[in-house]
Image (cartoon, rainbow, N blue to C red):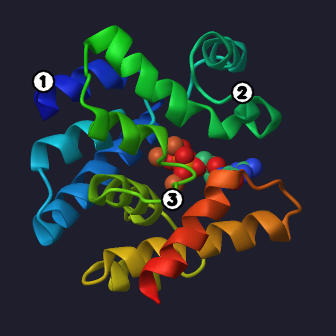
Amino acid sequence: MNKDEAILLVKPHLTKERFDHTLRVATTAEELAGKYNESKEKVELAAIFHDYAKYRPKEELRRRIIKSSLPKDLLHYHHELWHGPVGALLIEQEYGITDRLIQSAIRYHTTGKANMSKLDMIIFIADYMEPGRTFPGVDEVREIAQDDLIHACLMASRNTIQHLMNKNASVYPDTFYTYNDLINRIN
Ligand code: DGI
Ligand code: FE
Ligand code: FE
Ligand code: FE
């Protein structure tokens, strides 16, 4: 499957705003792929499909987590955390995308995880810093991402955790594992 084919498959599942976000994530991720020597084809597919399941009804997402091998603890956390893992399953079931690296990047794009691959990090950070994002501190992350992928992911992870804690939200374990792992990789 090439990028244009993927775009046609994803488009009907997203709102206009989410679709535009998806295209910006793809452009951002492609730039990073060039810089960090990652497969452009894998980056494109992972980016185009990363929010594929974002608008599935909550009950469908819940049901798919229950009947799959995905961790059930997801169900005890915010439903925003469900679209990545379920999206990774759906692209295999519906489009036969079996590439484990692509599936992982989609699955973990919201939380990150320990030991992220280069592809995982590129999608994680492209989603965070695409030009439509206005989070406090995002410009600094964009700058760092030009020459230190791990450091950029660490900053994004820290900003997200701080934001979640400031609003008294619960934080999924993988979100903390991401931070701890990246801190260890930097020191
Ligand atoms: O799908 P997007 O909006 O493009 O972005 P995303 O999938 O990275 O994030 C969706 C939301 O999930 C975002 O508001 C941040 C939030 N989030 C990330 N980690 C956690 C989290 N929310 C909770 N409750 N816990 C987390 O660990
Ligand atoms: Fe997402
Ligand atoms: Fe994100
Ligand atoms: Fe996204």
User: Quadrant location of residue 57?
Assistant: top right
Q: Nearer the viewer, residue 6 or 78?
A: 78
- Single out the residue that lies furthest toward the right: 168
Label at residue 72: 2
The residues bearing labels 2 and 3 have C-alpha atoms spaced at a distance of 19 Å
Residue 106, placed above or below residue 5: below
**Secondary structure category for the residue under label 1:** loop
Which residue is pictured at 63% across the width and 9% down the height?
A: 67
**Secondary structure category for the residue under label 2:** helix
Q: Is residue 49 left or right of residue 5?
A: right
Q: Nearer the viewer, residue 111 or 18?
A: 111
**Quarter of the image that includes the N terminus:** top left
Disc 1 residue type (three-letter): Met
Label 3 CA crowd tier, 10 Å (few <14, some 14–19, many 20+): some
Q: Please state the horizontal and vertical placement of residue 179, each as a whole percent of the image.
A: 58, 70
Question: On the image, numbered disc 3 is attached to which residue?
Answer: 114
Taking the image as drawn, is residue 50 in sight? Answer: no
Q: Please state the horizontal and vertical placement of residue 31, each as a whole percent of the image.
A: 17, 64
Which residue is pictured at 37% across the width and 44% down the height?
A: 105
Contact? badges 3 and 1 (CB < 8 Å): no
User: Quadrant location of residue 90?
Assistant: top left
Q: Please state the horizontal and vertical placement of residue 155, each as a whole percent of the image.
A: 52, 78
Looking at the image, tell me whether mark 1 or mark 2 is earlier in sequence order: 1
Label 2 CA crowd tier, 10 Å (few <14, some 14–19, many 20+): few
Foreground mark, 1 or 2, reads 2
User: Quadrant location of residue 149?
Assistant: bottom left
Q: Nearer the viewer, residue 93 or 166?
A: 93
Label at residue 1: 1
